[in-house]
């Protein structure tokens, strides 16, 4: 406990130093990445100049569908724990935490979700944070499964398969209720949370795993459409592989905490995998469009959720006269 307190205190006193180190590491990463891809940029720029806007719009729509469905998983986790949250409130909280990933530091994502949930009436910050961890863990495990299952249908995939499978297996153990509850409870007790985390039925956990696998396939459809927008012609069967690619990119984004929203490492990992179904220029153009689509869709859905939430809170107008 004393060690955690000392680390938190040190980090609080040296926020500027930590931010500067993060920016230096990120700059070094981008410089090395730019140098490695220097021969591909010209081809990618040409593909982007001739991008098909219809396919790009369809890709954004598919990505929006992924987010709109993904929110239901978090609501299901909270519902299993006895917390009811309206869809607009959940969507707004999810999107504001996604946008908070762009702020250097790494702590703003859970903080934004906790604050948004509190505004919606859910005041148990520890429970909200635990639900986020479970959501991320289940989604990552489902993404690894989707990626591994898709490999026989795509040739020439260069991926660190063994570390990825080991990572997924470790997460699969950690999200099990018999492991997650005591482990999360032990961590939370160090921060003064004394209540026991609610249990989750194995059936619900299995359904959520299948559900998140389905969301990654929807994300794969978005990538497939973005590749088509820059002139690539991936086979329809590659949609599942591209869903696994999106999952790997999201996992990398979480692990590389120095990069806000995984900016750079996420694109690099996805670029390497997408070379199995496209040229270098097309892959680079598609990951660039994917980043634009991610940010634009997250902003749009945050505004949408806020508008619907405002409509929920507004009282119904009074009638002008007595009812007939």
Image (cartoon, helix red, strand yellow):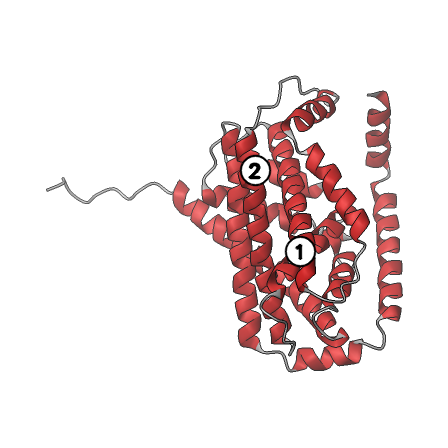
Find residue 244 and name its label: 1
- SS class, disc 2: helix
- SS class, disc 1: helix
Callout 1: 10 Å neighbours few (<14), some, many (20+)?
Answer: many
Callout 2: 10 Å neighbours few (<14), some, many (20+)?
Answer: few
Quarter of image, res 112: top right
Disc 1 to disc 2, C-alpha distance: 19 Å
Where residue 222 sits: x, y (%)?
Answer: 58, 63
Q: Pick out the residue farthest to the front.
A: 152
For this rendering, which residue is in front, 225 or 313? 225
Where residue 276 sits: x, y (%)?
Answer: 73, 68
For this rendering, which residue is in front, 254 or 209? 209
x 67%, y 40%: residue: 137
Say if 169 sits above or below 155 in the image: above
Q: Are marks 1 and 2 in contact (CB under 8 Å)?
A: no
Where residue 34 sits: x, y (%)?
Answer: 85, 69
x 15%, y 42%: residue: 321
Q: Is residue 243 left or right of residue 27?
A: left
Q: Pick out the residue farthest to the top.
A: 194
Quadrant housing the C terminus: top left
Residue that carries the numbered disc 2 in the rendered image: 206
x 19%, y 45%: residue: 320
Q: Earlier in the sequence, mark 1 or mark 2?
A: 2
Q: Is residue 218 left or right of residue 183?
A: left
Quadrant housing the N terminus: top right
């Amino acid at each position: 406990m004393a060690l955690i307190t000392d680390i938190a205190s040190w980090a609080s006193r040296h926020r500027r130093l930590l931010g500067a180190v993060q920016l230096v590491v990120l700059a070094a990463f981008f410089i090395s990445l730019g140098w490695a891809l220097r021969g591909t940029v010209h081809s990618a720029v040409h593909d982007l100049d001739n991008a098909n806007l219809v396919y790009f719009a369809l890709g954004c729509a598919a990505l929006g569908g992924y987010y709109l469905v993904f929110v239901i998983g978090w609501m299901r986790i909270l519902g299993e724990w006895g917390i009811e949250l309206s869809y607009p409130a959940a969507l707004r909280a999810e999107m504001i935490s996604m946008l908070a990933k762009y702020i250097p530091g790494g702590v703003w994502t859970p903080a934004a979700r906790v604050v948004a949930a509190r505004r919606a009436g859910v005041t148990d910050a520890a429970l909200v944070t635990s639900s986020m961890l479970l959501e991320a863990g289940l989604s990552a495990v489902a993404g690894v499964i989707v990626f591994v299952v898709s490999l026989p249908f795509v040739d020439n995939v260069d991926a660190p398969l063994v570390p990825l499978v080991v990572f997924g297996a470790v997460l699969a153990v950690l999200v099990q209720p018999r492991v997650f509850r005591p482990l999360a409870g032990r961590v939370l007790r160090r921060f003064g949370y004394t209540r026991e985390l609610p249990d989750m039925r194995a059936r619900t956990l299995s359904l959520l795993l299948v559900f998140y696998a389905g969301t990654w396939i929807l994300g794969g459809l978005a990538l497939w459409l973005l590749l088509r927008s820059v002139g690539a012609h991936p086979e329809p069967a590659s949609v599942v592989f591209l869903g696994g690619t999106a999952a790997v990119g999201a996992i990398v984004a979480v692990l590389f905490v120095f990069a806000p929203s995984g900016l750079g490492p996420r694109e690099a990992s996805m670029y390497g995998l997408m070379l199995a179904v496209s040229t270098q220029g097309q892959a680079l153009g598609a990951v660039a469009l994917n980043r634009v689509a991610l940010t634009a869709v997250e902003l749009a859905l945050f505004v949408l959720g806020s508008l619907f939430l405002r409509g929920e809170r507004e009282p119904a107008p009074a009638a002008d006269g007595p009812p007939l």
